[in-house]
Amino acid sequence: MGVCNLCEATCGLLLTIEDGSVTGVRGNPDDPLSRGHVCPKGVAIGDVHADPDRLRRPVRRIGRGDDARWEEIGWDEALDLVADGLARAVNEHGEDALAIYLGNPNVHSLGSMTHGVALAQSFRTRNKFSATSVDQLPHQVLGYLLYGHQLLLPVPDIDRTSYFLVLGANPMASNGSLMTVPDFPGRLRELRARGGRMVVLDPRRTETAKVADEHHFVRPGTDAWVLLALLHVLFAEGLTRPPAYVDGLAGVEELVAGFPPELAEQASGVPAGEIRRIARDFAAADGAAAYGRIGVSTQEFGTLCQWAVQMINLVTGNLDREGGALLTNPAIDAVGRGLIGRGHHDRYRSRVRQVPEFGGELPVAVLREEIETPGEGQVRALLTVAGNPVLSTPDGASLDRAIQGLDFYAAIDIYLNETTRHADVVLPPTTLLERDHYDLVFHLLAVRNTARFTPAVFAKKRDQRHDWEIFRDLYLRVTRRRRRKPPLKRRIATEARMRMSPTFLIGMLLRSGRSQTTLTELRRHPEGVDLGPLRAGQLPGRLRTRSGRIDALPALVAQDVARLRQRALPRDGELLLIGRRHQRDCNSWMHNTDRLTRGRARHQLLMHPTDLASRGLSDGALVTVRSRVGEVRVEVAATEDVMPGVVSLPHGYGHGRTGARLAVAAGVAGVSINDLTDADRLDVSGNAALSGVPVTVT
Ligand SMILES: Nc1nc2c(c(=O)[nH]1)N[C@H]1C(S)=C(S)[C@@H](COP(=O)(O)OP(=O)(O)OC[C@H]3O[C@@H](n4cnc5c(=O)[nH]c(N)nc54)[C@H](O)[C@@H]3O)O[C@H]1N2
Ligand SMILES: Nc1nc2c(c(=O)[nH]1)N[C@H]1C(S)=C(S)[C@@H](COP(=O)(O)OP(=O)(O)OC[C@H]3O[C@@H](n4cnc5c(=O)[nH]c(N)nc54)[C@H](O)[C@@H]3O)O[C@H]1N2
Ligand code: SF4
Ligand SMILES: [Mo]
């Protein structure tokens, strides 16, 4: 039995192993959460394990750029080199001279959660970055502001809801996010079978839009107007029934009074009449849940959008109600037990652009300028862990150049990708099938309460290291080399914890606290243990706010509404760029498996036929896409599935620079959307506004 950690759905797997390799992958029908679901990526999980291009030993770079050569070196030498490079930056230039970027797969690795985060925290630099600020930062800011904890996030009760309102998410391809929902297609069928409805707002007629009861095109970046208008209607028509533990609703009502559906129609293209009807249907439904994801997080008003999504659930009485949006009760409650901090905001700001931190992290959109701008606190050394920011963060091409100017760069990664190819040393950990897994994060966000522990499928080889061992060894080595060491008591405590294996820690966490299961029980049931459907009626008890109540209108939100008011509505004829995901893509990696890269190419720019015609372009042409920051050349594909005025490129492509040998060979390396996105476009949370970038196509 195995588990897939490639996306947030965390499906349980049944693996066939022959002669030490994976020859078959099926979904595990006995898994109480994933119920037998598996997708093409999960089926390809053995390909990563077997991939000859995957790094298995540390490598050191000799030479630069296209002339670089890689030399395998031993672990001790590699760890020493990395510790030397990181400690030297700190000793010579101060704590802030070291930057760290934690990429997406960290949340999917138990060892990263137990040990990687601790290593990052031991660096007292302000220059900590992660994929959070190109992803879900608005959610975390609002979890903190509304509910008192950055990860206290209500999850749509999809198994019981009768009205599911989806903005800027494509769970048919992504399998859900901040909503661990394996087998979304099956769960949607059940929703429809009980007479429920799904309504989707998206600038593209996505796979999810196609199976929805209603789909409305919305102009990119204008959802805030639509969402505020939905609230406007709910208040104006007396459709609210908020719980008693909420303050500040009069302020919300006053604020949304200035955002009628007619204004929203002008901004977004969604007809005012439809907005009114959606508000009424939502309020009338017996259990309704509004949900917004990447498309409404990574835009200029991401925080406003996510706030309004929370408000719609709250004022209609659907927060903490069956069929609405509910809190989970995981076996290890990392939020309730304080394993993850509540969050904090604006304790300090970035050096160059003065953007506020959140939860001890700065927006990754400022990383390039922190590397390139001279002065005290300039970033001189970088550690990336499971990340590829050159492809994943705004204006990646400029970051690509900046990284090459660093004194020292080390990566912990299993591939040489577009970013790690610049590293001085790469330390490759074992991969999923070689390590134990318990999900500390996604049980927190799942549509059903379950618990599952998955022991490693393959034993690691003698010359391999788990990621937690790499984090431990780096912690010890860097600390030893630092001129200013952390206080002795803290050092001893951290060191002791770093020496415990993740599995040992999970056992401990399950024994302490009031866990609903034990590691012994989980070992006996590797398919997972069912802890029941999500529970209603947990609020206000579980709020972590100081008042024990919800302040519906935090100052940050109120101020940002003023920014929205001043915002000019999009102009006709302007082309706005959005991203997309495909079921067979996995962010910026997994493009080195034949299984996922063969078949119809899917890296093209999607464009509406009328937009092509008005520019004298034809389907299949090679076009130049330009934004304020850069340009790419890519094939265009005509489709009526995108709204006129909108073009779409997938993210995670652009392997022409290097990496993903098989994708390059198959001619599907594509271009990077983030060569076009703009590091200056930020939401008020600091999240990158990757969506809705103005571009021209010629
Ligand atoms: N324009 C645009 N940009 C986007 C997005 C978008 O929608 N549009 N989406 C954003 C989002 S939501 C995210 S999460 C980010 C993701 O962007 P990143 O944080 O850069 O993460 P990945 O692209 O997943 O890159 C993961 C890297 O980790 C390595 N890896 C895989 N497994 C392991 C492991 O177990 N251990 C280690 N050490 N390494 C491993 C892989 O080889 C790969 O190089 O991209 C963001 N960028
Ligand atoms: N197959 C696959 N699954 C994945 C991933 C992957 O790379 N591949 N990545 C995983 C990760 S890291 C994450 S964070 C999740 C993300 O999960 P989702 O949020 O479901 O991801 P997307 O498919 O990018 O969906 C975003 C949608 O927003 C739309 N959109 C863009 N701009 C706007 C806008 O301004 N307004 C509105 N209303 N919509 C807009 C896009 O057209 C797109 O349909 O997926 C995860 N699952
Ligand atoms: S939906 Fe696919 S990628 Fe996501 S966990 Fe399941 S098998 Fe893995
Ligand atoms: Mo993500």
Image (cartoon, rainbow, N blue to C red):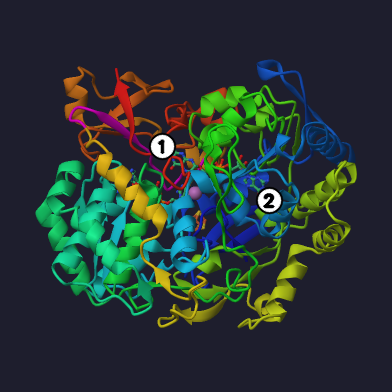
Where residue 164 sits: x, y (%)?
Answer: 28, 65
Q: Does the magenta stretch include residue 43?
A: no
Q: In which quarter of the image is the C terminus?
A: top left
User: Magenta segment, which residues?
Assistant: 571-587
Where residue 602 sits: x, y (%)?
Answer: 39, 35
Q: Is residue 248 above or below residue 304?
A: below
Q: In which quarter of the image is the N terminus?
A: bottom right
Residue occupying the far left of the picture: 273
Where residue 189 is drawn, which disc sits there? none
Residue under the point 26% across and 72% down: 316
Q: Does the magenta stretch include residue 575?
A: yes
Q: Which of 580 and 354 is in front in this view?
A: 354
Where residue 11 sits: x, y (%)?
Answer: 52, 63
| Amino acid type at image mark 1 | Pro
Residue under the point 20% across and 44% down: 268
> Does the beta carbon at disc 2 come under 8 Å from ligand 1?
yes
Q: Main secondary structure of the magenta part?
A: loop
Q: Is residue 510 above or below residue 441?
A: below
Q: In this view, does 544 lie above or below 498?
A: below
Q: Quadrant of residue 441?
A: bottom right
Q: In which quarter of the image is residue 608?
A: top left
Where residue 411 sits: x, y (%)?
Answer: 71, 38
Residue under the point 53% across and 33% down: 353
Residue at image mark 2: 431
Mark closest to the chain's N terminus, 1 or 2:
2
Where residue 650 is drawn, which disc sits there? 1
Q: Are marks 1 and 2 in contact (CB under 8 Å)?
A: no
Mark 1 vs mark 2, CA separation in Å: 26 Å
Mark 2 lies on a secondary structure that is: loop
Circle nearer the viewer, 1 or 2: 1
> Does the beta carbon at disc 1 come under 8 Å from ligand 1?
no
Q: Nearer the viewer, residue 110 or 356?
A: 356
